């Protein structure tokens, strides 16, 4: 009986290990250089036949091979001729690590009960063992913002890198912003109750906006007071008023965007980003004048209005970029965690609809890094910045050619093996045998 129990325990342990996340890569111990690749810097610049030298997790040298000296002694050389090197892609407004399986309640930590939850910190619920996160890396998606959902004020987000033992190791910017869901100025009738399914004004809109405004005013008064009695939700909002935290407002319609920006300005909040922003293209002058950045809703989605062009969502990025607005892409929506791995291909679609390839690249590298406040270390390939980058055999914005050979976070050489790559190898062999 003891033998059988030990056998069963051993089997369970080995089974658990076989489905676990890849072991995080160790710290860089030896300098290396990537030689010969086309380097896409992430700020619109491209360097052909480049040299990138990495030491202690930082880029120390980057430039053309013809003019950049390279000491090959005591250094590993990665020959990347004919390939491309990119900054690690950044998922803004994501929920990776908060839900593993939607149908399994125990794996879902996406939102909290209640309407006003600014003190809820998404980072402590972040699961580094997520197999969904693991599947991001083979597409070059290496960094992301972990954002709570639900309520009027959802909570506080943090920014992480996608190769870590635990959330403390993963975090690169803690509690960077607070997220609110702006009231809908219009609503659709409930057709299943016999109501007209068309749009109609939300009768409670003015009261909902006033309630939100009152909450912010009370929080500001509390933080300006003596704070003799603690109030976690109000305390969590202090960074908004001091300028240390970013305010992310989820809102799509033209009236809602205008009202939300005016509301935030009236509260003397300086760091404001509109998230979703479906109709932001109609307000480019207003957004530019108020220095508002935009996290644009998933590019691969259907138009909402029967009057919109079929390619409406594909063209919005160019309209905002041409207006001089700081814009990045975000993946929220149906199956958003799995679809986050398609981030580079969302950017590729914007390139097919007006942007240059390098402008499209900025939407998922430099621009989100600026919006999330991590651009001093991430988002572009520059000397002194983190060596968070990857090498692809082809165009990283094209799903047919974005085949990674190497990926690094802070100079650490990552495993690109995932459950998906294992299945690909398994079934590739099967169909090769049949042919």
Image (tube, rainbow, N blue to C red):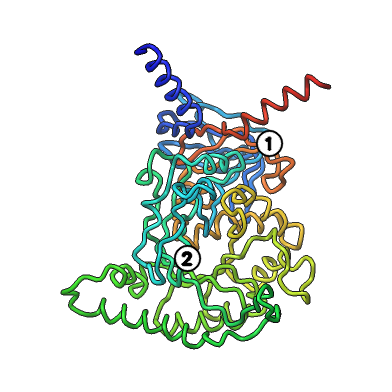
Query: What residue is disc 1 on?
Result: 393
Residue at figure coordinates x 50%, y 54% from the top left: 95
Residue appearing at x 62%, y 77% in the figure: 253
Q: Image quarter for residue 86? A: top right
Residue 384: x, y in percent?
44, 47
- Give coordinates of residue 349: x percent, y percent: 72, 56
Q: How many marks?
A: 2
Residue 55 in the figure: left or right of residue 350: left
Where does the image place residue 245, in percent across and percent down from the top left?
38, 67
Q: Badge 1: few (under 14), some or many (20 or more) residues near its Cα, within 10 Å?
A: some
Give the side of residue 163 with respect to residue 300, left or right. left
Foreground residue among 411 and 48: 411
Label 2 sits on residue: 150
Q: Is residue 78 above or below residue 119?
A: above
Is residue 235 found left or right of 5 in the rendered image? left
Q: Residue at x 43, y 70 (%)?
A: 153
Whether residue 60 is visible: no
Residue 202 versus residue 227 in the image, above or below: below
């Amino acid at each position: 009986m003891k033998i059988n129990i030990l056998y069963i325990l051993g089997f369970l342990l080995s089974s658990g290990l076989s489905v676990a996340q890849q072991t995080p890569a160790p710290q860089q111990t030896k300098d290396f250089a990537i030689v010969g690749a086309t380097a896409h810097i992430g700020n619109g610049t491209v360097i052909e036949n480049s040299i990138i030298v990495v030491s202690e997790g930082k880029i120390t040298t980057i430039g053309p091979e013809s003019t950049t000296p390279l000491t090959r002694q005591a250094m590993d050389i990665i020959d990347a001729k004919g390939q491309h090197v990119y900054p690690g892609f950044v998922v803004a407004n994501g929920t990776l690590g908060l839900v593993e399986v939607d149908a399994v309640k125990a794996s879902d930590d996406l939102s909290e009960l209640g309407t006003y939850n600014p003190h809820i910190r998404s980072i402590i619920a972040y699961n580094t063992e997520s197999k969904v996160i693991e599947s991001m890396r083979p597409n070059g998606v290496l960094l992301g913002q972990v954002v709570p959902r639900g309520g009027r004020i959802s909570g506080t987000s943090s920014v992480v890198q996608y190769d870590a033992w635990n959330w403390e190791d993963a975090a690169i910017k803690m509690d960077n912003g607070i997220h609110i869901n702006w009231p809908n100025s219009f609503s659709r009738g409930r057709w299943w109750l016999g109501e007209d399914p068309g749009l109609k004004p939300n009768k409670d809109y003015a009261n909902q906006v006033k309630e939100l405004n009152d909450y912010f005013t009370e929080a500001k008064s509390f933080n300006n007071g003596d704070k003799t009695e603690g109030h976690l939700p109000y305390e969590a909002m202090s960074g908004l008023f001091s300028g240390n935290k970013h305010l992310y407002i989820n809102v799509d319609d033209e009236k809602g965007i205008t009202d939300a920006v005016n509301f935030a300005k009236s509260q003397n909040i300086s760091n404001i980003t509109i998230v979703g922003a479906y109709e932001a293209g109609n307000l480019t002058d207003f957004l530019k004048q108020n220095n508002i950045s935009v996290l644009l809703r998933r590019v691969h989605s259907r138009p909402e209005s029967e009057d919109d062009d079929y390619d409406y969502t594909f063209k919005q990025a160019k309209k905002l970029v041409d207006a001089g607005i700081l814009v990045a892409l975000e993946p929220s929506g149906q199956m958003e965690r799995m679809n986050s791995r398609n981030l580079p291909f969302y950017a590729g679609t914007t390139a097919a609809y007006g942007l240059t390839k390098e402008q499209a690249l900025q939407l998922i590298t430099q621009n989100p890094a600026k919006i999330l406040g991590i651009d001093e270390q991430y988002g572009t390939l520059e000397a002194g910045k983190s060596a968070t980058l990857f090498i692809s055999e082809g165009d990283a914005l094209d799903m047919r050619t974005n085949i990674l050979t190497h990926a690094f976070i802070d100079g650490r050489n990552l495993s690109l093996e995932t459950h998906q790559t294992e299945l690909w190898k398994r079934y590739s062999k099967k169909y090769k045998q049949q042919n």
